[in-house]
Structure formats: C-alpha cells, structure tokens
Image (spheres, grey):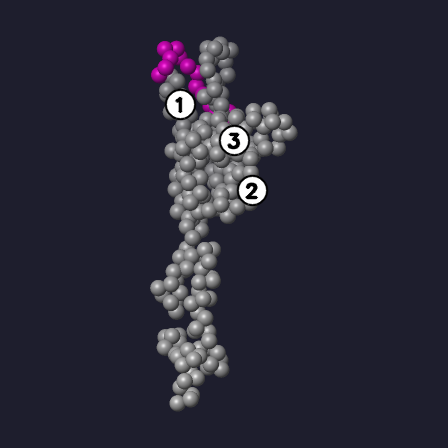
Amino acid sequence: MSTQKAEMIDVHEWEAEESNEDRKTKRDLMVTKVERSAEKNEGNKVYVRGMLKKGATDTKKHKCAGAYVWYSVKQDPQTNDKMYDHEERSEWEDRAPNWQKIMTTAIGDSGTVERRKMKKLIGDDLKTLHPSIVKACEEDLEAFETEEVAKSTNKRPKMRIKSYTIGLCEVQLGDDEAYNDHMKNLHGVTTQVSSKKLKSNIYPDLDTISGGGGVEKVLTELGPTLKVISHTNGKHVPISKLQAQPGKRKWRWVLKT
C-alpha cells in the first residue's frame, strides 16, 4: 500500500469567504483546476461552473463521493540555470492525471461511487494515494516532459513531482439522471443509477417504482384481496386463489340463496 500523502482541499471552500471579491477569486481558481481534471478524464468542462455554484452541496438524493487529483512538478535536479525564468509555468501547477478507470473500481452495488470504496483509493484519512493513482500521475508527467523536450533545442533538466492534491467532491444531486450526468461530465465515470422497478407477486402486471407512488398503487390494487382475507377469519388462503374469491357483495348473494 502506498504511503504517498497528498494535501486535501475542499473544492467548495470558496463559499466560506466573506467578501464577494474573495469568493469570486477563489471560485475562479477552483474552476480552472476542476476543468483540467474534467478534460483529462474525458469529461466535459462546460459543466464545471454549474457544479461550483452556491448551494451545490445542499442535501439532496445523491451525494457524490468522488474526488479530484492534481499534482505539481519541479525541476530536478535543482540547478542555478535560468532557462525557465521567462517560460510559462502554468502547466507545472495542478496538473490532472487520467484516473477515471481507477475511480470506476469504487462503484458499489448501489450503482454509485461509494465513499467506503473510495477510501481504498485515497485512504481512510482521504489523503493517502493508492499506488495506481501515483503511477497515473507519473505517466502523465512523463508524457508532458516528452512534449517539453520536443519543443526545445536546449537540453532540459528532468522534472519531478513536487506535490499532490486531493479535492473531495461533495456535490449533491436531486435525481438519478443528474447524478449519472455529474459523474460522467465531471469525473469521466459512467454510472447507471436508476430507481429499481419492483414487481408485485400477486399482480405481476403491476409495475411500481420506488419513490414514485408505488406503495399507494399496490395498496389500491390489494384492497379487494385484503377484504377477502378478512372473511377467512385469519385462515391461510393460497395466494393463487385469492383473486378467484368473490367480493363482499357476492358473498351476501351466495348466503341468501
């Protein structure tokens, strides 16, 4: 198990800033970081600003247990040359690896990415990276370094990873479709969360959907059956024969004749 530690940050910490200016500044910085992650993991950065909005973590049906990972690099070995002094270094900070396939392993029986399984990837302390994530960062750096060397005629010093950062995503979504869209567009993970259809054993043609008024439908349909059971004085009646039993009015007619 890896012991590689990362700094843990709250993706929504900008909301706690007191001034509008500070909130906007911190939010814009976070938008840039999350956009990089979404793009690298085959998501869609168009959805990032909608996710980083006030109230995004308010209680709803689904709470995202996913995370974002970034790493920053440094020149290695450290030298006194000035070859990087006038070069753009924005790509050195908060680089995002592609680890969408790794996060997919945290999908549980519920169809959602589960926090207990995510802990196997980012530790119980939520800041210890699994070796597979560290490797994903190293592979991304290797590809970046190759690109940098190709752009220059000068011999360039090797780069090394300077630090890692984990951003917990605690967005809450109001329905299954919104959750699936969020996971795909922000984390690059395909989930198929949907309300399970329940079948009535007594009425097999009756489809009920959890949370969609199914209980009321079942009770409405079972009303006549429950009345028949009441006429048996609690004695067992095979389910298959319940629907064949006459209703209350028919029972009265039978007794009179």
Q: Secondary structure at mark 2?
A: loop
Using the numbered discs, state the Cα–Cα distance from disc 2 to disc 3 in whole angstroms: 24 Å
Q: Position of residue 86 (x, y in %)?
A: 47, 10
Pointers 2 and 3 in contact (CB under 8 A)?
Answer: no
Of labels 2 and 1, earlier in sequence is: 2
Of labels 2 and 3, earlier in sequence is: 2
Q: Which residue is mark 2?
A: 58
Q: Position of residue 245 (x, y in %)?
A: 39, 79
Residue lying furthest bottom:
257
- Quarter of the rendering occupied by the C terminus: bottom left
Q: Which residues are magenta?
A: 150-164
Question: Is residue 82 at all visible to an observer of this figure?
Answer: yes
Asked if the stretch drawn in magenta spans residue 158, the answer is yes
Q: Nearer the viewer, residue 20 or 75?
A: 20
Q: Position of residue 251 (x, y in %)?
A: 42, 83
Residue at 44%, 39% in the rendered image: 182
Q: Tell me the mark number nearer the camera, choosing from 2 and 1.
A: 2
Q: Which numbered tag is attached to residue 250?
A: none
Residue at 43%, 19% in the rendered image: 158
Q: Secondary structure at mark 1?
A: helix
Using the numbered discs, state the Cα–Cα distance from disc 1 to disc 3 in whole angstroms: 18 Å
The answer to which image quadrant residue 148 occupies is: top left
Q: Position of residue 97 (x, y in %)?
A: 43, 31
Q: Secondary structure at mark 3?
A: strand
